[in-house]
Image: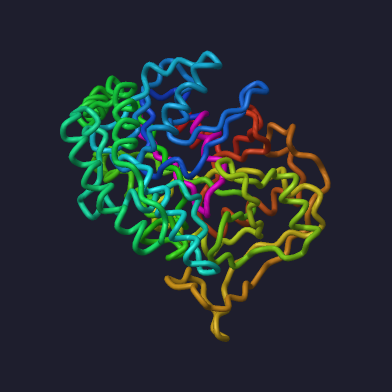
Amino acid sequence: MPSNVIVGLQWGDEGKGKITDLLSKNSDYVIRYQGGNNSGHSIHVKNRYFVLHLIPSGVIYPNVTCIVGAGVVIDPKSFIQEIKNLESIGIDVSKVFIEHRAHITMPYHLLIDQYREESLGKKAIGTTHRGIGPTYEDKIARIGIRALDLLDKKNLYKKIQYNVHLNNALITKIYKKPPLSFEEIYHEYEEYANLLYKRIIDSIYRIHRAFQEKKNLLFEGAQAMLLDINYGTYPYVTPSSTTTGGVCTGSGIPPNFLENFIGISKAYCTRVGNGPFPTEIFNQNVNNHIQKKGNEYGSTTQRIRRCGWLDLVALKYSCMINGINCLIVTKLDILSGLNVLKICVKYKIHHKIFKNFPSDMQGKKIECIFLEFPGWKEDISFIKEYDHLPKNCKNYVEYIEKYLQLKIVLISVGSERNQNIIKNNQLFNKIFS
């Protein structure tokens, strides 16, 4: 059976949750490899709506083992609440596990995230205040607390004591805020340890054994390519590796485990928070159409998403970095009703034309060179066959394929599981069977 990885190719919110759900049905393992509870995967099933923040999307299938890998940072409070929410609607969570080496988000991480953003003012990154960045910082500084530390109370006591003392100095002297109580934090996390100890495992050998046994492995991330710490629109990025390369470091596998590199892109673009967004739409009527029809509000924070036209310069860059061999386009139905559609095919910066995605966008005035396409009025959300799509719709889709030199395997035209159009049957059967 193949091993698949799903990667969002834009700034997030491409519909990875729905596609992961579709692939999970035939998977034995779904493994999360990066990020924290600063993003959400939305899944719709028969009028039931799920938002998953830390737990892999495969949890709704009883045959799937879900593993939160070493590349993920875990807020235990959020994780436990998510478990309880799933249990309350009858979902079996007995096969959800946390890798020993995953790092733990602590209360001081949340506060430092918040205080730092406040101090930056207009220069703030626009984080979710979930403490993700500071957790990764402690990981790199080699003072982080890992999931396995929750299994050793004496070691946990010493590590929390050290970190609270260190962070209280920062909180009180730099940010002029009241200090945290070591005792309160330790007792809180001692209780989390009691609730989670059966789920904390050394998953590396288990994943490798599953591969040797030809099990079907699916790897999912949280954020998307253009938020990658190395290759995204720095500094307005997430602090982890969101690319297919991050799969290996975040879950403990070699590259040859991976066969299908599945990229997810909306038929347009959105971005939450601050940062460069070349194709952002400032026409209020068009922006409102996409925002309202597409329900473009953050799954985690409910922040309004900035909306933009499809950016093929950025998308080609993302496909190249990730080695994408299968492309899925989502939310094509949202564009129905617009008279004219635009696709960015080049950038103009300081009177020079660029076909490549620049490494530094900060402070640069980027002018997009657009191609315009006539829109379509028809509601396409009920269409099941590609040939039944309006002609203008097909022209739009086929130009994307031509520019990227990639085949689109699937088109999503709604949030429900069955609102999909298979465009390439051969690729679809290879991936989804």
Q: In the shown orientation, is residue 401 left or right of residue 221?
A: right
Q: Which residue is drawn at 50% across and 21% down?
A: 86
Which sits in the foreground, 328 or 132? 132
Q: Residue at x 70, y 45 (%)?
A: 294
- The answer to whether any part of residue 426 appears in the image is no
How many labels, in total?
A: 0
Residue 414 seen from this side = yes
Point out residue 140 in the picture as x, y percentages from the top left corner.
Answer: 25, 54
The image position of residue 274, as x and y in percent, is 55, 62
Residue occupying image coordinates x 61% and y 54%: 270
Residue closer to the observer: 210 or 191:
191
Instruction: Determine the image quadrant of residue 201.
Output: top left
Q: In which quarter of the image is the N terminus?
A: top left
Q: Position of residue 124 (x, y in %)?
A: 50, 64
Q: Say left or right for 18 vs 343.
A: left
**Nearer the observer, 333 or 94:** 94
Image position, residue 30 (x, y; %): 39, 29
User: For residue 319, which quarter of the picture?
Assistant: bottom left
Would you place residue 118 above or below residue 290 in this image?
below
Residue 358 versus residue 343 in the image, above or below: below
Q: Give yes or no for residue 16 being in the magenta stretch.
A: yes
Q: State the extent of the magenta-drawn residues as a range.
A: 1-21
Q: Which of 23 and 182 is in front in this view?
A: 182
Task: Identify the residue shown where x is 52% and y is 23%.
Answer: 85
Residue 212 within the segment the image draws in magenta: no
